[in-house]
Image (cartoon, rainbow, N blue to C red):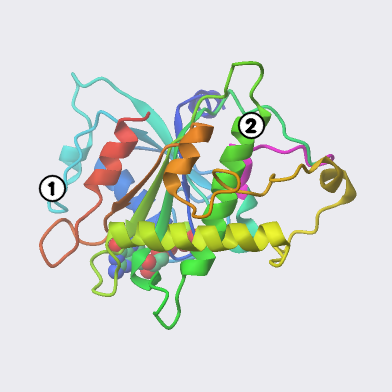
Amino acid sequence: GSSSSKNSSLPSILLAGPSGAGKTALLTLFEKRAGRSTSTSTDEKTEPAKTHTSQTPVSIKLNAAAPFSSSSSSSSSVSSPSENQPKRNFLLIDTPGHPKLRSTALSHLLPLDPKTGRPLPPSKSQPIKGVIFLLDASTLSPSSPDSSLSQAATYLYDLLLSLQHRYSRYTKGSKHPPSIPVLIAANKLDLFTALPATLVKKELEAELGRIRVSRSKGLLDSGVKEDDVTAGEKEEGDDWLGEYGSERFEFRQMVEFDIEVEVMGGSVLGNGGEEEGPGCEGWWRWVVERV
Ligand code: GTP
Ligand code: MG
């Protein structure tokens, strides 16, 4: 209908990250705190299923000018924007984290022609203003029995590489595509096993550096078989993330490709009380500054 075509031209924030990170929980919380009741889900359900693994992308319309209350006790009257408030609507796009469904998120950043595998121009109708890469910081420690570090870093590597390719492939002369900043949101800091944001950053940088070396040596099979078309087009260093040839990977190397990366801790559960976790107001502020 007319409303959906209107929605699709709104500035958008992409929510990505591994399965179980809390993406759908975050979307639900943002909707409660700052949403307008108009949900624009792409499937028949209007409410995102909170505790189920997502299989389809769902987007909701939010207002960046809405007051964001950190207290869960404040009811819907607070979250609905008042009359004199300018509406700054934007879309939040939730994507599935399952490894087989990750192309859903990546195709927003680097659309590829399904037939040829060649990049298509970035969508003008749905301008992505930022990516929240959410992860579960409580299982990230490499020493934890079910460490999610390698899973999370693999996904993050592919995501950042997509943005790097977007920058290098869509640059015509001196004209670069609009930059897409990345917020690495370390979630579940309410749990005592959670790593603080500084450590999350350190562990991720180290793991991304390991992935980078493995892939350049061809030791690690990314699971994707390159067909002849893309293999023929591949240039040396095409799968290398960040500064080519550097010994250590650091997020600030992405600045060379006009990609700003920030790591910030928080928790979807808990509302800022000392024992309940730091909340997610910082993430909301990051979003509001970019839409
Ligand atoms: P996929 O849809 O599979 O990609 O996962 P998802 O990222 O959407 O995860 P989801 O929102 O379904 O959350 C997974 C589980 O983590 C749920 O049981 C949430 O209640 C829980 N969870 C989310 N945020 C937090 C948090 O801040 N702290 C704690 N302790 N649990 C959380
Ligand atoms: Mg989900």
Q: Which residue is mark 2?
A: 168
Determine whether the residue tagged by mark 2 lies in a helix, strand or loop. Answer: helix
Task: Please state which amino acid type lies under the numbered disc 1.
Answer: Ser
Is 247 on the left-hand or right-hand side of 274? right
Residue 98 is situated, as x and y percent measured from the top left of the image, at: 57, 62
Quarter of the figure with residue 121 = top right
The question of residue 106 being in magenta is answered with yes
Q: Is residue 82 above or below residue 163?
A: above
Rendered residue at 46%/68% (across/down) = 149
Please identify, in this view, whether the residue under mark 1 or under mark 2 is nearer the observer.
2
Under circle 1, the secondary element is loop
- Considering every residue shown, the one lying at the far bottom of the view is 145
Q: Give the CA distance from mark 1 to mark 2.
A: 46 Å
Pick the front one: 204 or 131: 204
Instruction: Please identify the quadrant where the C terminus is shown.
Output: top left
Is residue 186 rendered to the left or right of residue 157? left
Question: In front: 156, or 57?
Answer: 156
Q: Is residue 270 above or below residue 254?
A: below
Of pointers 1 and 2, the one earlier in the residue sequence: 1
Instruction: Name the residue at 33% across, 24% down.
Output: 88
Mark 1 residue crowding within 10 angstroms, few (<14) / some (14–19) / many (20+): few
Q: Residue furthest left?
A: 274
Residue range in magenta is 104-116
Between 3 and 125, which is closer to the camera in this rendering?
Answer: 125
Q: Residue 154, image x and y in percent?
A: 56, 60
Q: Residue at coordinates 19% horizontally, 35% vertically from top-left?
A: 67
* Image mark for residue 74: 1
User: Where in the image, quadrant-wise, is ligand 1 located?
Assistant: bottom left
Instruction: Tell me whether circle 1 and circle 2 mark residues in contact (CB < 8 Å).
Output: no
